[in-house]
Image (cartoon, rainbow, N blue to C red):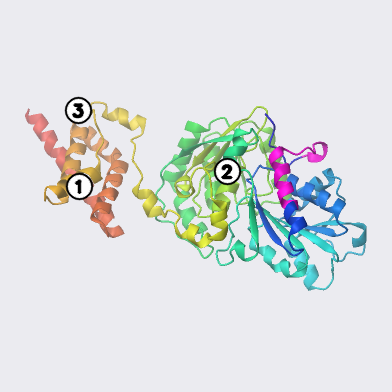
Amino acid sequence: MPSAHFDQDFEDKKELYGYQQGDIDAIFERLENKPPNYHLLYQLPTGGGKTVIFSEIVRRYLTQNNKKVVVLTHRIELCKQTSKMLKGFDVRNKIINSKIKDLPDQHDYSCFVAMVETLKNRINDNKLHLDNVGLVIIDEAHYNSFRKLLSSFKNAFILGVTATPLSSNIKMPMHENYDELIVGDPIESLIQKGYLARATTYSYDVGLTSLKVGINGDYTVKSSDDLYSNMVMQEKLLHVYTEKALGTKTLIFNNGINTSLYVYETFREAGYPIRHLDNTSSAEDRKAILTWFKKTPDAVLTSVGILTTGFDEPTVETIILNRATKSLTLYFQMIGRGSRKLANKSEFTVIDLGNNAARFGLWNEPVDWQHIFKSPEYYLENLRDDVDIELHFKYEMPPELRAKFKNTTDISFDVDKVHKEIISKNLRSKVVIDLSLSQHARMCIDNSSDLTEAKALAKELLPDIESRMKRYANCLSHCSKNYREWLIDDYTRNLIVLIAKLNRERLDD
């Protein structure tokens, strides 16, 4: 099978795969037949080789046109990677970074790679003038910072490239800036053809209703830190890691630095090899940590934001989403860090602790990018919200807890089904709670030898109780959060009372 590791050390490997060549031909058809100021957007999944494709486009364009090309990126790492790739395609290019104040030698180059902010500042200061530009390529085109420069290249063909053609700002939809979207091979196709590794996803239900949404449309760092740094979530993370990812090279994505530092301490205390990385890390620390991560087979790297783009480590075997996001782009970027295919790696693991798969679908499921491009508001408005997702949680008792109730054949209780039956008989809704309490109390008595043991078992039923009361409250509809919390407290108190009653009956027998 071919390797899909496109973004590193490409100087010695310039062949293009069939799907890449086909997309390049489609793009050139637009270049040759559309107006010179046409705006074209091109989508291809992370790992599909976007940099390879647009490097070949630059090479081919320059052989056919006596005009210049500008490639725009939003991060310095991407600038360097792009420049290196272009050199691999024999395209001599110059990086315009913060050190470049003017361009006395611009006529010596036909291709420039620039940071958006740097180029904008130089143009605004009238210190830089790029003339005769015929093609502008925008990498990671979903970022809105590029809009600032479009007016500087009014007569150039604009080619935006992205894995997710959904604007980072809903108020600035991409269809306002691009005339057309070309969609490349989907993820499942690239997996089947052997270019990407296949993901196995394990999703764990997490209550997210405490999270708050910020002005950018995603969950706030503070509310995420409050949830994910608590002891219950830390223990859950450690448990799923040891269950599904132990011994694999693992990348953990968090929403806040505090959470990531908690993760670091939790794993370190458990004896696992772990490092922490965020955007406050120095360049030296970042380099040292990434070198360690590359060389250590079972390394765990916990991070915040910094490794979603411009980072390529194909040996990653497990991705843990220790966060929730409402950003489709971020969802694909995070999982894409594990999708690189190697000779000895055809699969990787995704552990989802943010209900992200329930929100967006599995990573390799088909996405209607044309619909999202044309109607982003409709798509975003119809994403499943957290309340809806949590209503469909199905509580499953962990095997180690189920073993404590081995004397009970059936521990299941379908709240929705029982509620319908009760209502159809014109009985009060509260009968559902009475039946549930009766089952839980009997479970505790049948699997204990005395009252102390029975009460201890009752405490362990709390997650099941919470799940049942959430479903019960939903059956009633329009219940306040306070009422739901009262239901759980009241249920727990009544359970202890009922257990004590059944225990007395047991002693009397």
- Identity of the amino acid at label 1? Lys
Q: Of marks 3 and 1, which one's residue comes earlier in the chain?
A: 1
Q: Which mark is residue 420?
A: 1
Residue 14: in magenta span: yes
Q: Which mark is residue 335?
A: 2
Q: Residue furthest left?
A: 508
Q: Position of residue 123 (x, y in %)?
A: 79, 70
Residue 44: in magenta span: no
Between 34 and 267, the residue placed more toward the observer is 34
Q: Position of residue 86 (x, y in %)?
A: 81, 48
The magenta region covers: 9-28
At horizontal 67% and vertical 39% (from top left) the residue drawn is 313
Assess disc 2: are there few (<14), some (14-19) or many (≥20) residues with their C-alpha within 10 Å of its C-alpha. many
Asked whether the viewer can see residue 93, the reply is: no
242 versus 228 height, above or below: above
- Identity of the amino acid at label 2? Ile
Q: Position of residue 291 (x, y in %)?
A: 71, 39
Give the Cα distance between marks 2 and 1.
41 Å
Image-based side of 350 in relation to 5, left or right? left
Q: Nearer the viewer, mark 3 or mark 2?
A: 2
- Decide whether the magenta segment is chiefly helix, strand or loop: helix
Image-based side of 61 in relation to 27, left or right? right
| Residue ID for mark 3 | 449
- Residue 396 image-quadrant placement: top left
Q: Nearer the viewer, mark 2 or mark 1?
A: 1
Asked whether the viewer can see residue 80, the reply is: yes
Give the Cα distance between marks 3 and 2.
48 Å
